[in-house]
Image (cartoon, rainbow, N blue to C red):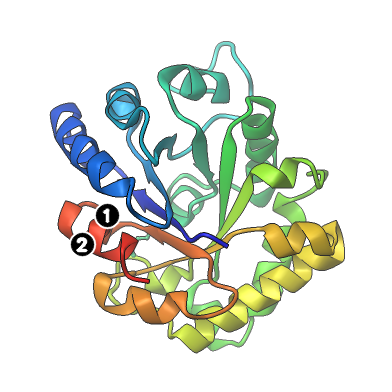
Amino acid sequence: MTPHIIGNWKMNKTISEAKTFVSSLALTANNASAQIGLAVPFTMIATAAEAARGSAVSIGGQTLYEEPSGAFTGEISGALLKDAGASFVLVGHSERRTLFHETDEQINKKLHAAFDSELKAILCIGETLEQHRAGATHAVLEEQLRKCLLKISPEQCMRLMIAYEPIWAIGTGNTATPEIAQAAHRFCREVVTASLGEIVAATLPILYGGSVKPENAGELLKEPDINGFLIGGAALSLESFTKIIHCH
Ligand code: PGA
């Protein structure tokens, strides 16, 4: 599977910085053997998508609201993201779950909304440090997958990616070892096999996220069930993001 290298800018950068960054990235992206994406703040989706046009770079949003339109002040729909030039959206990032109290049930609705708007979606899952220490990782992942993927069809899964992001590894510098990440990815694939079938599971990109850097990306990507990355901090620098894109 071609690796998917996706950056998540979170609440960073300006429109003009996005334009410069994506224009340079678009030039190098075309000789990379990777699918490249950047999830950017809403305000710069249109500019970034314009700068990425005709290149191997896709632009996405970082969240969406579950309703298609209406009186939801401050929210954004899948259709509006698409209209601005996004082709994918992150759903259920741990910062959305923790800081904005998104539940698995809500995340499931958001996934349906993303697919209804013909966006691709990256479903983020992962356990806390306490859960990790208690040996509850598999149980947590299984429950998140079961609830978040409720009534998602095998056809919709053609536009789905999963990002396994252990919360203890996000922004901490404590990357999961390749062995730990591989075991979690393998387990996620087994859960998806059981619920959605072997074909869906075999073609589903499962990305790793949590302190991915140029120094550790190559080793992680050698694992058979790690199909790419969701990258926060290291995607803010063109140099480190490009190094990760070319790490294999
Ligand atoms: P990080 O963030 O790479 O800075 O750990 C990953 C993420 O939050 O998606």
Please name the residue that numbered disc 2 is placed on.
Answer: 240
Sequence-wise, the earlier of marks 1 and 2 is 1
Looking at the figure, which quarter contains the N terminus?
bottom right
Determine whether label 1 and label 2 are within 8 Å by CB: yes
Count of numbered labels shown in the rendering: 2
Q: Can residue 237 be spotted in the picture?
A: no
* Coordinates of residue 37 in the picture (x, y in percent): 40, 45
- Left or right of 13, for residue 225: right
Q: Dot 1 lies on which element?
A: helix
Residue name at image x 31 percent, y 47 percent: 29
In which quadrant of the rendered view does residue 188 lie? bottom right
- Which residue lies most toward the front here? 31
Q: Amino acid at mark 1?
A: Ala
Q: Is residue 215 above or below residue 193?
A: below
Left or right of 18 on screen, residue 201: right
Cα–Cα gap, marks 1 and 2: 7 Å
Which quarter of the rendered picture does the C terminus lie within? Answer: bottom left
Give the image location of residue 224, x and y in percent.
58, 78
Residue tagged by mark 1? Answer: 235
Q: Nearer the viewer, residue 178 or 76?
A: 178
Q: Quadrant of residue 53?
A: top left
* Beta carbon at label 1 within 8 Å of ligand 1: yes
Residue 165, image x, y percentages: 48, 66
Q: Residue at x 15, y 35 (%)?
A: 20
| Residue drawn at the location 63% of the way across and 28% of the way down | 118
Q: Residue at x 55, y 71 (%)?
A: 127
Q: Is residue 244 left or right of residue 191?
A: left
Q: Quadrant of ligand 1?
A: bottom left
